Amino acid sequence: MNLMELQRRYGQLREGFAVTLGKHKERILVHLEEIRKLQLEMEQDTSETTSEIRKELELRVTQTVERSCLEREKAHADISRLIEELEEIEYLMMRVARPEDH
């Protein structure tokens, strides 16, 4: 690859990084909002709330937290992969730009 191709690929990766980060951020924020609403719902319930309803709310909170954790793990993996690709392209650009140093 020549320097122009590497720079183009680097730009694509940086753009993909921003899009991926934004996508995961939005999904995580949705999960956090769901958790907040469920917690408010649980707090507003009175002692008249049956234990069955309370258990259902607790289950929904747990499932939402689990989805959020999975999303964060996926985000971490995606971002780590993109960072590795960016670092590889940066290294290749340095090699192409100054071949005598490498």
Image (cartoon, helix red, strand yellow):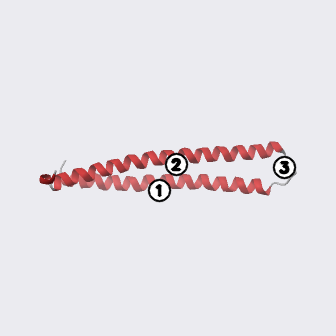
The residue under the point 87% across, 51% down is 48
Nearer the observer, 38 or 99: 99
User: How crowded is the residue under tag 3: few (<14 C-alpha within 10 Å), some, or many (20+)?
Assistant: few
Nearer the observer, 102 or 81: 102
User: How crowded is the residue under tag 2: few (<14 C-alpha within 10 Å), some, or many (20+)?
Assistant: some
- Amino acid of disc 2: Arg
Q: Position of residue 20 (x, y in %)?
A: 44, 52
- Numbered circle sitting on residue 72: 2
Find disc 3 in the rendering and name its residue. 49
How far is disc 3 from disc 2 in space, using C-alphas? Answer: 33 Å
How far is disc 3 from disc 1 in space, using C-alphas? Answer: 39 Å
Q: Nearer the viewer, mark 3 or mark 1?
A: 3
The residue under the point 82% across, 44% down is 51
| Side of 67 where 90 appears, left or right | left
- Looking at the rendered structure, the secondary structure element under dot 2 is helix
Q: Position of residue 39 (x, y in %)?
A: 71, 54
Q: Position of residue 59 (x, y in %)?
A: 71, 43
- Amino acid of disc 3: Thr
- First in sequence, mark 3 or 2: give its number: 3
| Cβ atoms at labels 3 and 1 below 8 Å apart | no
The residue under the point 14% across, 52% down is 99
Find disc 1 in the rendering and name its residue. 22
